[in-house]
Image (spheres, rainbow, N blue to C red):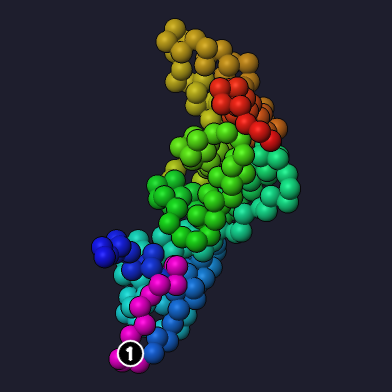
Amino acid sequence: MAEGPVLPPVVARMWGRDPVSRHGPRPSLRLEGITAAAIGIADAEGLAGVRMSSVARSMGVATMSLYRYVGSKDELLVAMADAAVPAPPEPEGTGWRDYLTVWTRANRDFLLDRPWLLHITSFAPPMGPRSLLWLDRGLAALADTGLGTGERMNVASTLTGYAVSHAGLALGAVGQEPPGEEAVAGLAEYSAILAEVLDPENYPALAAAVGEGAFGGGDDWIDDGDFGFGLDLLLDGIEALIAARRGAHPRTV
């Protein structure tokens, strides 16, 4: 019988598959406690404050003792990215569109609550139980739509990407960009910069939009109404795709 793939140690621990040794002292720490301490530091100081030494210090243990549970800061970030995610909303009998509206908004909102997550989730695919539960619920909402597995996966990925990108825009516009990234102070400054650098001959449409105050009227460009507008555009497209699939392959409901 072929053996399954070898899980990275931190992923195995996230899923409770850490092998238990019969020899040596029993583990005195748990991954959950380490990630909770690291998340507390990230919430207070941003990712720049998260170091193996700072996490160990906050727990009152030696830095080297952490390496039995997380092999590096990168592994710690993987565990943090999952542990910091709340549970996804439950369907509660709603249709796919209503549920995915709530699902996408909730995805954006927890990123707004913890800006440092954007620095991790933008580059790492979900691997932990919490993050993958979001993906599962998104796919489940589309189960009876007639979309294929790949199409449902693309829908969930697209809506997740929209939540991530909008959260990044919103945080950058109010000067709360993810740690390690530089951004302008707000939309007014952004508009002024664009007005300075844009050549109307090469950027006629964008220059006109800036001149008409598209980015300079407060935070309207990235407010909740704009989030809803963009989300409705995406959901309208998904609805059209579902209608096309049902027309090509009639289903009995």
Predominant SS of the magenta segment: loop
* 107 relative to 155, above or below: below
- Of all residues shown, which one is farthest toward the top? 201
> Residue 253, image x and y in percent?
69, 35
* 25 relative to 219, above or below: below
Report the side of 236 relative to 83 (left or right): right
Name the residue carrying label 1: 22
Q: Is residue 17 visible?
A: yes
Q: Quadrant of residue 246?
A: top right
Report the side of 69 relative to 118 (left or right): left
Quadrant where the N terminus lies?
A: bottom left
- Of all residues shown, which one is farthest toward the right? 93
User: Which is more toward the observer, 205 or 130?
Assistant: 130
Tell me the magenta residue range: 14-25
* 92 relative to 226, above or below: below
| Residue at x-position 36% and y-position 82% | 20
User: Which is more toward the observer, 192 or 168?
Assistant: 168
| Residue at x-position 50% and y-position 35% | 148
User: Which is more toward the observer, 1 or 136?
Assistant: 1
> Judging from the image, what secondary structure is the residue with disc 1 in?
loop
